[in-house]
Image: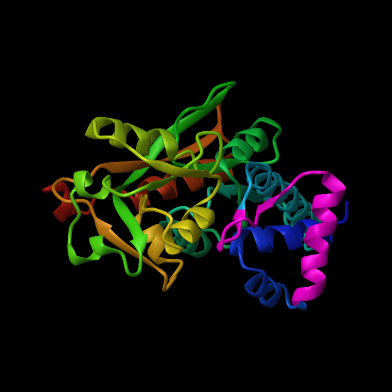
Amino acid sequence: MELRLLRYFVAVAEELHLARAADRLGIDQSPLSRAMRDLEQGLGVALFDRSSRQTRLTWAGQVLLVECRRVLATLDQAIQATKGAAQGYQSYLRIAICDSLAQPRIAALLARNREEEPELEIRIFELPLSQQLKGLHTDLLDVGFALSGSVNGGLVAEPVWTDPLSVIVSARHPLLVHKEVKLADALKFPVVLCHPDAASGCHDQIQAVLDGAALPLKVVDHVTSLGVMLTLVGAGYGIGFAIASQVEALNRPDIATRPLAGTPPMLSTYLVRRGGEPSEPLKRFISRVKRLNAPTPDEGGA
């Protein structure tokens, strides 16, 4: 299978709109449409559900999206490693981030790393939790950031920061009349959730919040990524739950966020790595993570 087809499919799967995907790829819409038909015929499966007004991924399509991202990330890693070797880099860290996780925090962390240790090469990969765990086990990654601490097989997960859980709605949703939304009011609407075997690992944390509400829940879809969830929410299929700063960093006009009323549930982000003594570059990186999120004297009540 051509890598070109994988890149085309990722664009269409993330945009769920042929014209936008074609514009993103810089190609005409007609050959892109043919490429998707060829891909489906070659695999012998339907990747897109075209039965409604809004194109959606089938479950097979969602699984392929996860695997395509893994393949393309591995290829990009090989290219970066080759270029790094040619430029004489001898010290690097391979860091995986789940689904655009906590972009402002990650950006601040990388900026500090660049300032304090500019000679350390940083390679960033966006991978779902399942692929992060595989990459750590096979030594393709050094560290990952995810919304789950459920690891095994010699991996360790350490909580490094928390963020409040927010309600994600379409730009014209009736819940937007409230500055804060009660969870009971939010759950009157259909919900789009992350699949338990994909995405950033946030499923267990969010599911625990919803289970604690002890209210009936209508789940319209389980998705493999934040991008797909936002597309369905923006199209009005249902509401979602996520970290507001993560969503707002994407600057989507069809999406709005609202904090949950009262004391909002907090989602923990975990640093995941192999057990044992970390390398010296990784030790220094972990130290920066901890310093970045340490309370200031005012916050600490000193």
> Which residue ends up furthest to the front in the rendered image?
51
Q: Position of residue 249 (x, y in %)?
A: 42, 66
Point 77% across, 44% down: residue: 45
Is residue 37 placed above or below 43 in the rendered structure?
below
In this view of the protein, can residue 209 be seen by the observer? yes
Viewer-closest of 159 and 232: 232
* Quarter of image, res 248: bottom left
Colour setup of the view: rainbow
Look at the image and say whether residue 47 sits in the magenta stretch.
yes
Range of residues picked out in magenta: 29-56
Q: Is residue 85 left or right of residue 122?
A: right
Viewer-closest of 79 and 59: 59
Q: Position of residue 33 (x, y in %)?
A: 77, 67
Is residue 76 placed above or below 195 in the rendered structure?
below
Q: Is residue 232 left or right of residue 181?
A: right
Viewer-closest of 12 and 79: 12
Look at the image and say whether residue 224 sits in the magenta stretch.
no
In this view of the protein, can residue 104 be seen by the observer? no
Q: Position of residue 190 (x, y in %)?
A: 36, 47
Q: Is residue 94 left or right of residue 8?
A: left
Is residue 111 placed above or below 90 in the rendered structure?
below
Viewer-closest of 135 and 258: 258
